Image (cartoon, grey):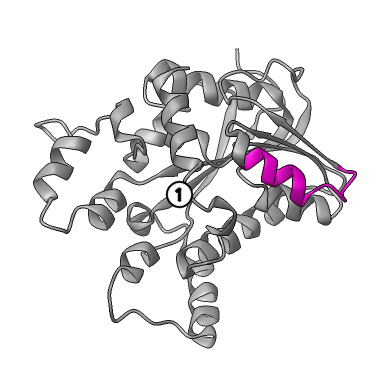
Amino acid sequence: MSKRLEFVNMFYNKIDEDERLSRSRQGQMEYITTMHYIHRFVKPNSKILEIGAGTGRYSIALAKEGYDVTAIELVEHNLDILKKNSEELDNIQSFQGDALNLSRFEDNTFDMTLVFGPLYHLYEEKDVQKGINEALRVTKKDGVILFAFLSVYAIMYNDYFRDNFVMGIKENFTENYKVKHFEEQFFTGYDIVEFEQLFKGKDVEHITTVAADSVLELAEGRSDFGMADADFEAFARYHLAICEKRELLACSSHVLYICRKNRVERK
């Protein structure tokens, strides 16, 4: 087993991934935002692939809405929960698999592809490009792909304001503040423009880049944080109105890059 696979299995075997999108305001906002953009672009009767489906919060919700869903998950523990929670649904298939190898699927198979976890744990550019290219390959022409990634700046603000900012700089940046990616980070973050540049020259049209959960991870770390249901509902409406603003993207822990596969290949 590679170090990457070992790390991923070890981490996700220890945490309650099934509750991540519901137990905190940050998780709730990430889920609301992501579903909002899925619903904006998904077409009726679509075949949807989710790569890195976790315990299936998105895949199961979309299957319950009537879509034909295929879920791929790397971690066996998560996959077991996904299968258990979806056993009464006949329009969802789930398999163990890696974002770097989608060879079980033919080209141009899915109307929408969701990649919501794998790019947090890919470090070498060749692997990142392979993961992106596999997702694009299996998506139909004119299909929409949503990629989730982490903001390196949000990682700095969320994780390194505990007398360890020097360590954060060393772990995430070179001496001239170029973003670093390496396996021991486990979760790797990106500069927004850096991530968008990964798609340069690919047969896709960039639709938008979206802040998925705003500053809620940082805010919830405060001892005086509180957000009643009415306030959260107001915040959610506000967030969905502004979440594509460029100046706000890097403050969000999770970011969505949304693109459409070109109908005709570039020459």
**Span colored in magenta:** 78-91
Q: Is residue 197 left or right of residue 201?
A: left
Q: Residue at x 59, y 54 (%)?
A: 18
Q: Residue at x 23, y 50 (%)?
A: 156
| Residue located farthest toward the top when viewing the structure as drawn | 267
Q: Residue at x 35, y 70 (%)?
A: 220
Q: Quadrant of the C terminus?
A: top right
Q: Secondary structure at mark 1?
A: strand
Q: Is residue 191 left or right of residue 4?
A: left
Q: Residue at x 48, y 70 (%)?
A: 25
| Residue located farthest toward the right when viewing the structure as drawn | 90
Q: Position of residue 146 (x, y in %)?
A: 59, 42
State whether residue 128 is above or below residue 144. above
State whether residue 50 is above or below residue 220. above
Between residues 229 and 55, which one lies in front from this camera angle? 55
State whether residue 189 is above or below residue 21. above
Q: Position of residue 147 (x, y in %)?
A: 54, 39
Tell me, yes or no, whether the highlighted magenta stretch contains residue 67.
Answer: no
Q: Which residue is mark 1?
A: 255
Q: Position of residue 182 (x, y in %)?
A: 30, 26
Q: Is residue 204 visible?
A: yes
Res. 34 image quadrant:
bottom right
